[in-house]
Amino acid sequence: MCTRMLILYQLHNVKHHEVFLTVLFDIQISDNWPGYSLDLFTYPQHYYGDLEYVLIPHGIIVDRTERLAKDIMQDIGDNDIVVLCVLKGGYKFCADLVEHFKNLSRNSERFISMKVDFVRLKSYHNDQSMQDMQIIGGDDLSKLTGKNVLIVEDIVGTGRTMKVLLNNIEKYKPKMIKVASLLVKRTSRPDGYRPDYYGFEIPDLFVVGYALDYNEHFRDLNHICVINDHGKTKYRV
Ligand code: IMP
Ligand code: MG
């Protein structure tokens, strides 16, 4: 498995007997996954002191995305699809996914013929009131009638956002709708929505980087990181 990485790290030495704790980095990132020290990687200086640790390094994101692209191609290749990128958080994942589709299409018998479009979701009040969510930007959604649509999103949390978007798109009767989300958050909600494809399932933490933001900050960070209290206070609005 391409993104499975076994991390062994030494806890401490007890009278020459080394005690190891084995933590498995997997697609399902466990609640006790300690992440990687920030010192192991480079990241923008303006975020020094604002982050707790690296949850998923950039290289692993890209490698996992390549595999997702292959899986999606296997399932829906040879169709014309409309890739619908959900802005702003989905732009990095979408760009990398499309790049992999292009590479796979060039180098194999199967290919995807794609159009790429963008939507932005805005809620009138705040993220809590999704009833009032507005879909803005991109082409008229009526253009999706009869089309194979691949929605590309950064993260599914409670799933409320995705459900509202799906309800809106279904009205226009596309031929097929699939959803690819880079991340799925393990929330306590039993009715949580599960996308058709996802990169990683993560603990219920607020994460930033790789286009995911905290009040518009951290989109320029390559790795997916956990923000610390200092960062939250500094960029609070
Ligand atoms: P949901 O409606 O709870 O599923 O939330 C989904 C949306 O909230 C995503 O499209 C993100 O824009 C945003 N979001 C949820 N969790 C996070 C996070 O940990 N970091 C950054 N944005 C998040
Ligand atoms: Mg989003």
Image: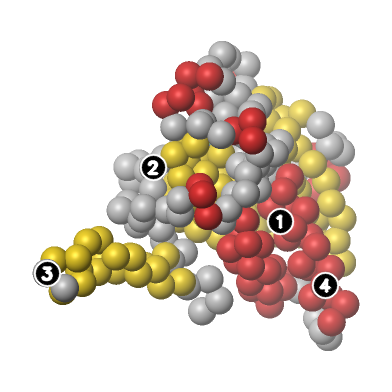
| Secondary structure type for disc 2 | loop
Residue under numbered circle 3: 15
Image height of 19 relative to 175, above or below: below
Do labels 2 and 4 touch, CB within 8 Å? no
**Which of the pair 236/193 is nearer the observer?**
236
In the displayed structure image, the side of residue 9 where residue 132 appears, left or right: right
Quarter of the rendering containing residue 219: top right
Report helix, strand or loop for mark 3. Answer: loop
Q: Gap in Å between the C-alphas at discs 2 and 3?
A: 38 Å
Q: Return the residue at label 4.
A: 103
Q: Are marks 3 and 1 in contact (CB under 8 Å)?
A: no
Residue receiving disc 2: 204
**Viewed as shown, does residue 57 lie left or right of 89?**
left
Residue visible at 65% across and 27% down? 216
Question: In the image, 55: left or right of 218?
Answer: left
Q: Which residue is mark 1?
A: 150
